[in-house]
Image (cartoon, helix red, strand yellow):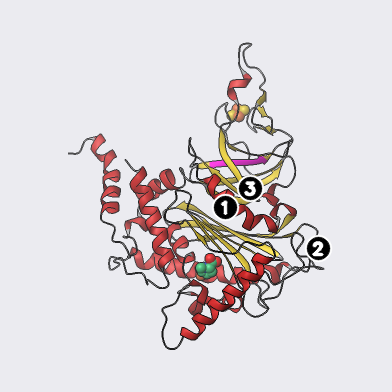
Amino acid sequence: MTSPCQSLSAPGELVRELLARRRPGYSLEAPFYLSEALYQVDMEHIFGQHWIFVAVEPQIADAGDYITVDLGVDSILIVRDDEMQIRAFHNVCRHRGTRLCASRQGMVGNIVCPYHQWTYDLAGQLIHAKHMSDDFDLRSHGLKPVHVRSLSGLIFICLAEQAPQDFEQMAAEMTPYIAPHQLSQCKVAAQVDLVENCNWKLTMENNRECYHCVGNHPELTISLYEYGFGYKPDALNIGRLQRFEEILAANHKRWEGMGLPSAEIDTLERRVTGFRTQRLPIDRSGQSQTMSTEVASRKLLADFVEPALGGLSFWTQPNSWHHFMSDHTVNFTVLPISATKTLVRSTWCVHKDAIEGVDYSVENLTSVWNATNEQDRRLVEESQIGIASGAYQPGPYSPFTEGLVEKFCNWYVNRLRALVR
Ligand code: 3BY
Ligand code: FES
Ligand code: FE
């Protein structure tokens, strides 16, 4: 018979064994996508210890605006305070634990618990609690803070007591790339939540390759050069690969000359807060990820006058990707719901002065990624079904087209190796 202690340590042993025998260059073993114990490990050590992209600043443009974000069992409240600072707290009352804000978004003067009306200011301080004893100390019952940072309008949170310090390095390197798009001067034009019946890692792995693009994304591949994501050179495509490199080099020269950094940075594997960026050309008119490849919003972002700025892509470990164009931005956050359910939240922003129906239509703005997300949902759900079968065994990645999937898996496995005791 196993003692309660042995049964408690068993999941840890399983995880360590799976991590130890991971075969480089191959997809992960089935328990990584199926097991409840592994999901708990992911929530504790990946989503609980790293910087997680959750929202964009235009979602909380004014003092008192708030959003809530669920990370597993944790609900996080992100507010803009009266000094216009962004703050994040556990959405949990310090009286008897009630969730303070049930809505996904809203506006408040103070944060009032619905249960017994304990009241917190936007800095998280408890300012009213009726009927408590005379020696009750309001000051020691403030909301529990969560680390929060904005990277040029992209809001990241970290639940760990000590957040990874290399966020600052990422911010220093990425600010010159993202800041010119002036996300804080934008408004949210559309936000779509898609629930995928798969493990969150399948969503992320799928995002890190374009091996599947030509066969599955007719709308996205109108504007996206699939050659930018790596192909094995052969007699048929060598010319196109070379042509892409020429287009890339010529555009980088042009954009850098306009003050828009474009060169690739890749820290996906070597940093705790791993990321990759590159400004990529857009096919045909070169302007935007739309069906026509022309801008979706006539009112360009920031002070841009040139619409053909390609798309600045930014991918972060463990859970986001972003595209910044001359006329709009689109940001994706991946949030696990359970071992086999994942939320993909897509947010499109346009200049705050752009007028719907005059400067842009939501349909035109969102159609490429709505179609692409739906295609990706089907792909990852079919992967999940196949992986659940006893016949699944880890398969080999293409060294030409799936290098970034391997980097995602290596990062994930190495982070768990460092953190799971
Ligand atoms: O990161 C992206 O958005 C692209 C598009 C499809 C696959 N992925 C590499
Ligand atoms: Fe919040 Fe009582 S639980 S006031
Ligand atoms: Fe895809």
- Residue appearing at x 67%, y 54% in the figure: 179
Disc 3 or 2, which lies upstream in sequence?
3
What is the magenta segment's predominant secondary structure? strand
Please name the amino acid that badge 3 sits on: Arg
Q: Are marks 1 and 3 in contact (CB under 8 Å)?
A: no
Q: From what the image shows, is residue 367 above or below residue 333? A: below
Q: Residue furthest bottom?
A: 236
Q: Is the Cβ of the residue at disc 3 closer than 8 Å to that at disc 2?
A: no
Highlighted magenta segment, given as a residue range: 75-79
Residue 389 placement, left or right of 319: left
Local packing at callout 3 (Cα closer than 10 Å; few below 14, some 14-19, many 20+) is few
- What whole-number distance in Å separates the C-alpha atoms at marks 3 and 2? 25 Å
Residue type, numbered disc 1: Glu
Q: What type is the residue that disc 2 sits on? A: Ile
- Judge depth for marks 2 and 1 and give the one in front: 1
On screen, 132 above or below 373? above
- Gap in angstroms between the C-alphas marked 1 and 3: 32 Å
- Mark yes or no: residue 337 visible: yes
Quarter of the image for the N terminus: give it: top left
* Quadrant assignment, res 364: bottom right
Can you give x and y, in whole percent of width and height, for residue 371 in the image? 59, 72
Which label is found at residue 23? none
Q: Splitting the image into four quadrants, where does ligand 2 fall? A: top right
> In front here: 192 or 318?
318
Identify the residue under disc 1: 173
Magenta-drawn stretch contains 364: no
What residue sits right under mark 3 in the picture?
Answer: 104
Element class at badge 3: loop
Q: Nearer the viewer, mark 3 or mark 2?
A: 2
